[in-house]
Amino acid sequence: MTDLNTLRYSEEHEWVAVDGDTATVGITDYAAEKLGDVVFVELPAVGAVISANSVVGEIESTKSVGELYAPVDGTVVEVNDAVVDDPSLVNSAPFEGGWLIKISIAEGAADGLLDRDGYVAITEG
């Protein structure tokens, strides 16, 4: 199980797990719950250069269509094909098998993101 206190969070409800120069990105359990049953996920291509706060994909649920925002600058190095094939993983395992993309990042790229307490504060407000 992922320790949610070690992750960084964006105000757009993405989580980021940094391991060296790679950031794994997904949407939070809060976002997954608000979306409802996820039925479609569109992710950027491997090799795509992305900028923080830019739209990089789409998540469609039975309730709505939402945009996926890049929480950090970098280059997409991997996409989670399992989520594309089975979008319900976003709901059932948002912090584990439901991750979306991995991004090659510069050192310190995630430093401006929220910690767990900061993220919880914006979701309870």
Image: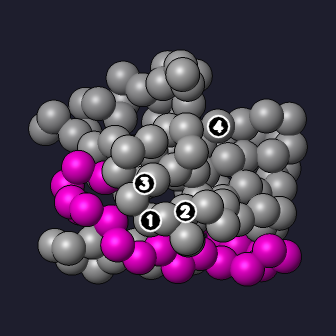
Quarter of the picture containing the N terminus is: top right
Asked if labels 3 and 2 touch by Cβ distance under 8 angstroms, the answer is yes
Q: Earlier in the sequence, mark 2 or mark 4?
A: 4
Asked if labels 3 and 1 touch by Cβ distance under 8 angstroms, the answer is yes
* Disc 4 residue type (three-letter): Ala
Instruction: Tell me the tag on residue 17.
Output: 4
Q: Distance between the residues labelled 1 and 3?
A: 6 Å
- The residue lying toward the viewer, choosing from 69 and 62, is 62
| Horizontal side of residue 8 vs 81, given as left or right | left
Q: Distance between the residues labelled 2 and 4?
A: 17 Å
Which quadrant holds residue 110? top right
Q: How far apart are marks 1 and 4 (CA)?
A: 20 Å
Q: Mark 2 points at which residue?
A: 83
Q: Is residue 55 above or below residue 88?
A: below
Q: Name the residue under label 3.
A: 90
Q: Magenta includes 37? A: yes
* Disc 1 residue type (three-letter): Pro
* Disc 2 residue type (three-letter): Val
